[in-house]
Amino acid sequence: DPELFQSQGIVDDVVEDVACCLEVPRTSLNIIASQKGLVAGPLQWIMKTSDLNNIGETQVVVDCSNKVETIPSIIDSIIAQKTNAIAILVVEKESIFQRIIQSSIIREAIVITAKGVPDYATRLFVKLLEDSFDLPIVGLFDADPYGAFIFFVYRFGSRSSAYDGMNMAISSMKWLGIRPSELKYLDLPRKCFKELDEHDHKLINKLLNEKYLPECYKIELNIMKDLNLKCEIEALTSDANKLIDLYLPTKFGKQDWI
């Protein structure tokens, strides 16, 4: 209703305010976002669905071992999961997600993307996996302030949903890369790096002012600030697919994440 709310942003704020006032998650208000996140890898789950004909519930087994599945909008409908994966890899971008699932990595790791800033369903899904399995959860993001911000949303939650943060913050998630401290050692062409702009510096300063942020992450942000450089994940795919053949195997072999 544009005449009443003017913009979608105002609607979103009102929904958050109502949920916070009632101290319930948005799903309890029957407000469900459209599906956004994708998952692939050695993972199965059982999901209950409504049977309109029998006015009851049925159970559906979802297997994403050989195909990409969309993360359900209602995570509460998942009642069981199983996997033989050795890790969970959360990727910032769908383009990188598509490259990874075409490699042998997909046989050993559950790969997830929310195509940018994570939506509620994707965050709750990763949180469910964290609670269900004793697996390392690591994130692959651009080495820029926005990539760091997206990782922090997964790891610590967002201000807009702070009232429900415990249900969505993935406390065991680690920052695999691309970390600013790696930029000097990646052996990439100069064209892969760009200087930070005014908006980048503003976001870095905003993140550095967050009281919750551990020192190890502040060090990375300060390195980025001092270098005045940023780099996208795609830079690792321009040179004989260094991302798949060298970067990720080395990272997992050394468990190089913070």
Image (cartoon, rainbow, N blue to C red):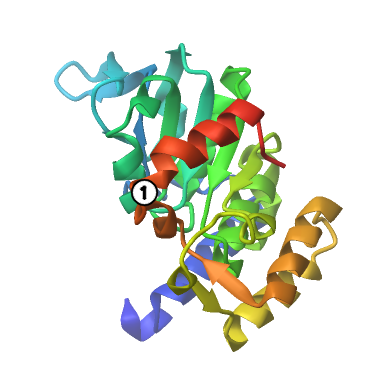
Q: Position of residue 76 (x, y in %)?
A: 46, 29
Which quadrant is home to the C terminus?
top right
Q: How many marks?
A: 1
Residue drawn at x 34%, y 25% as measured from the top left: 104
* Residue type marked 1: Ile
Give the percent coordinates (x, y) of residue 238: 34, 56
Q: Position of residue 168 (x, y in %)?
A: 61, 42
What residue do we see at 51% from left, 65% from top?
231
Q: Secondary structure at mark 1?
A: helix
Q: Residue at x 57, y 30 (%)?
A: 252
Residue 147 visible in the displayed image: yes
Q: Quadrant of the N terminus?
A: bottom left
Q: Is residue 109 above or below residue 209?
A: above
Q: Residue lying farthest left?
A: 53
Would residue 27 be found to the left or right of residue 218 on screen? Answer: left
Instruction: List the residue tagged with mark 1.
Output: 96
Local crowd at mark 1 within 10 Å, few (<14), some, or many (≥20)? some
Where residue 241 sits in the image (x, y, percent)? 35, 46
Nearest the eye: 184 or 62: 184
